[in-house]
Image (spheres, grey):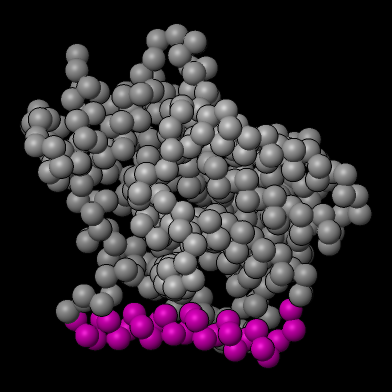
Amino acid sequence: MLKKNFPLVFIILTSFLIFSPVVPLYFFQDDFFLLTISRINNIRDFLRFFIPANGVIWYRPLSSQVFFFIGQNLFGLNPFPYHLVMLLTHLLNIYLVFLFTKKLCKNEKIVLVASFIYGVSSVHFITLAWLATYSFILGPTFVLLTLLYYLKKKYKSSLLFFVFGFLTSEVVIWTLIPLTFITAVYQKSRVKLVPFLIAVLAVIFVRNVLFPVRYVEAYSIIINPLNMFSLFKFYLYRTVGIPMLIKSMPNNLFKFIILLLSAIVILIPIISLFHKKTNSKLLLLSLAIYISFLSIFLFLPFHYSPHYLTFSLIGVSLFLGLIISSSARPIQAIFIISYFILQAVTVKLTYDTHWVVKRARLAKKLVQEGNLVHPVGSEKYISLGAGKAAEVFKK
């Protein structure tokens, strides 16, 4: 059995090794806020986790309050096991991408390439490094389970995972688009889709009528073609694996190597797409997944980040799996090697330079020193969750 599943095990182990450096990182910023609000003593307070708060933008009880509540009861204020849970969830997602792709097509190459693309993508780094962004790991888990069980025609289980997804991340409602595509192309009965549509309408009603969202400037929705194009370009570069700080790199040779690898990763799929015949239905499904989960973030010009791509990456993985697997073996090898090196380099570069890691280290230093009070707006103040660290560590 191990020999038969060795390629998948190898992919999972490779992903684990690439992202394992984030596991020792400390709590920082929003982590302290979530630790504070999830400290409860009775079942009534636990149930309040699931009641949307008026004026709060995000509603993510499972991936926020519940996750940190369970974490504190099991692990206390030791961040290591929290990160380990997040990393294991990511590894589970690789397996779910494997099952989802396998359900769509029996071609082993497509399945393995898709799993590899998803598993080692540098898009996951910030999410795995920042505990407060668990919704961008657990959310894709429920999206994949929803799609997988819908394809299996186990509609009740699919709907249940869909609902769990709502409680994890509001982004999950966009699963309705690929579900509609699957229904139109693969399923004969449209009736099975109705409960999913009702669930989405119910969520929209609750979050916009019963508990209206109060948008702050950073999350303002703006419809502007120029902004949307600029954001699409940003997310396209991050999807490929091009690091955000490439323009400021002083080493021109290193920059050239990264751009060369990026060109290979971009050009091979484009050339292969026009020279090889692939399953058009599956290609359209992959694009439906990618566009549906990316579209909402194209309207947020003041708040963008690579980790927003963890949902749409499901579609990218399927798309590249379909294209690359139909190419000649040498081309496949060149793409896989180039893609892997590019993601590994970007992860390392991000770990060394990103503010997420710097603030986690700063927060750990300040907590260990007991130095928890700082001027409002300072880097130390922000790293400690705007004063919430002091509340968490009160005896």
Q: Is residue 384 left or right of residue 332?
A: left
Q: Is residue 253 magenta?
A: yes
Q: Is residue 244 magenta?
A: no
Q: Is residue 382 above or below residue 180?
A: above
Question: Along the line of sight, which residue is nearer the eye, 191 or 335?
Answer: 191
Residue 115 position within the rendered picture, expressed as x and y whole percent measured from the top left: 58, 61
Residue 37 position within the rendered picture, expressed as x and y whole percent measured from the top left: 36, 24
At 19% from the left and 81% from the top, the residue drawn is: 251
Question: Along the line of sight, which residue is nearer the eye, 144 or 96?
Answer: 144
Q: Is residue 278 left or right of residue 213?
A: right
Instruction: Find residue 180 and report its image quarter.
Output: bottom right
At 91% from the left and 54% from the top, the residue drawn is: 188
Confirm whether residue 109 shows in the render.
no
Q: Is residue 394 left or right of residue 341?
A: left
Q: Is residue 139 above or below residue 389?
A: below
Q: Is residue 395 above or below residue 247?
A: above
Instruction: Find residue 227 and report its image quarter.
Output: bottom left
Q: Is residue 306 left or right of residue 7?
A: left
At 49% from the left and 10% from the top, the residue drawn is: 44
In which quadrant of the rendered image does the C terminus lie? Answer: top left
Magenta span of residues: 251-278
Confirm whether residue 132 shows in the render.
yes
Residue 246 position within the rendered picture, expressed as x and y whole percent measured from the top left: 28, 75
Question: Along the line of sight, which residue is nearer the eye, 371 or 88?
Answer: 371
